[in-house]
Amino acid sequence: MIRSRWLPGAALASISALALGACSMAPKYVAPAPPVAESWPVGDAYLAQSEVTLPLVSYTEIFQDPRLQSLVEQALTNNRDLRVAAANLAAARAQVRVVRANQFPAIGVSGSASRTEANGAAAGGTTGNVTGDRSSYSLQGGISSFELDFFGKYASATEAQRNTALSTEAAARTVRLGLVADLAQAWATYAADKELLEIAQATAANAERSVALTGARLKGGIAPRTDLRQAEQVLETARGDVASQTTALAQDVNAVRLLVGADFDEALLPGNLDEVNRSLAVLPAGTSSQVLLRRPDVLEAEYSLRAANADIGTARAQLFPSISLTGLLGVASNALSALFDKGAFSATGTAAASWSIFNAGGRTANVEVAKAQRDAALATYEKAIQTAFREVADALAGQGTLAERLRAASRFTEAATDTARLTEASYRQGITSSLENLDAQRSLYSARQQEIAVRLAAAGNRITLYRVLGGDQASPPQTR
């Protein structure tokens, strides 16, 4: 044990400098090259536009309807998934401070006081009692269990935890991005189901008229009973669809309420799909695939890779000796009046070094474990980029053909509408059969449903592009 009259403040400063200036055993992080092509696929399906940069834009620029924007704002405030993500992020950030505290000495202060009263016989056999009081005070402060981080063990652990926190932050942004996209999709789905309900109601009303007409023809002896039964089948099918779409519409409202996280004004819901599609901006194709590096799930994988890389430094530092330092600085006196006399102060310092000579290769194996985990994190990172590339390429392929699908569906509905009108007129005149008339009605009903499905797919494609391109995100957070 080393004793000295005083442990100057400069010594503490030197200790901290040694701790903070430690070298790092972690390998230098080099960002891997993205395992995807430099640009999106091209061809008729993609409608690639050269020299067009795909910007990162706010959801307000993509989802331009004020009603949807209002719902998104409410969801960003009330949604429980976002609250969970925010709590997880707060915990991850606090954990960084917990781990970083190991890089600094812990300084504590303790004090004590005691008083003793004694009554007894005087020395030498003298008759009488002697009364004496004794007081003792002490105050101590010092560094306890502080390990000098010469080889960067704690620095690497802090770096790993910091990147873990950044990964958690990216995960929270993924939740936010998904929430906005899910809410926009639910908003569009409500519009589609509302139109499907209206079509089912219109078809049921038309089928009721057909049943009445066929019933009158049956009574007049000019139509067989099979015609009436076939007309009733169309009617009951439409009635069943009315019931189903009524349920679907209520469930759509429930889905929006869950995403918003609170009750909302149903006047904020769209009236039809045309309103939805007019309010959704189209993202152009033709940008570099490097934009995927901004996706929050890709950022999450990258920061996990950085954390795994730093863990290698922690494992390597375990191979080297541990050097611990404790120090004690205090004052002690048997009497209060002498507490600050010269010589009342005392200081002690202790240094110790330990190094495990043999542990059956355990620490070396820890390094290998850390390297293997880093390799797994690298593969996960590359897979995240490849998956993102595939998702965006698929969405762009869909965008390139949706216009033609919409035109085809619209022309098919127009032809089915005209066919149904002409066939019903011919049936009323007795020129065509009831079966032909019913087939024309079924074809029109199916055509209108299919057109709505394609229009919903067009809205969904724009929402999907917003999601898979990592829209509404700022630049990646910098490691601090």
Image (cartoon, rainbow, N blue to C red):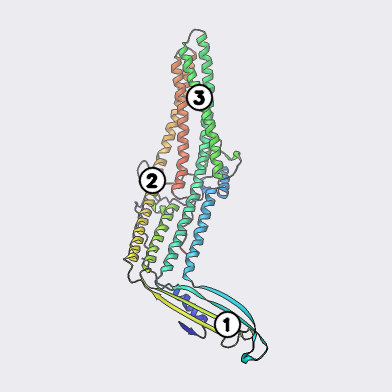
Secondary structure type for disc 1 = strand
Mark before the other along the chain sequence, 1 or 3: 3
Q: Residue at coordinates 54% horizontally, 22% vertically from top-left?
A: 205
The amino acid beneath tag 3 is Ala
**Is residue 59 left or right of 376 when viewed as pictured?**
right
Q: Looking at the rendered structure, which numbered label has been put on residue 113?
A: none
- Marks 1/3: CA distance? 96 Å
What residue is rendered at 41% in x and 68% in y? 153
Circle 2 is placed at which residue position?
393
CB under 8 Å between callouts 3 and 2? no
From the image, which quarter does the N terminus lie in? bottom left
Q: Which residue is mark 1?
A: 332
Q: Name the side, left or right, on which 254 lies relative to 390.
A: right
Compared with 231, 13 (above or below) is below
Dot 1: within a 10 Å radius of its alpha carbon, few (fewer than 14), some, or many (20 or more) residues?
many
Closer to the chain start, of discs 2 and 1, is 1
Q: Label 3 to label 2, Cα distance in Å?
A: 39 Å
356 up-or-down from 344: above or below: above
Residue type at mark 2 is Ala
* Mark 2 neighbour class, 10 Å CA radius: few under 14, some 14 to 19, many 20 or more: many
Helix, strand or loop status at disc 3: helix
Residue most extreme to the top: 221
For the residue pair 221 and 369, the one nearer the viewer reads as: 369
Residue topped by disc 3: 238
Task: Give the residue at the far right of this rendering.
Answer: 128
Residue 184: x and y, percent? 51, 43
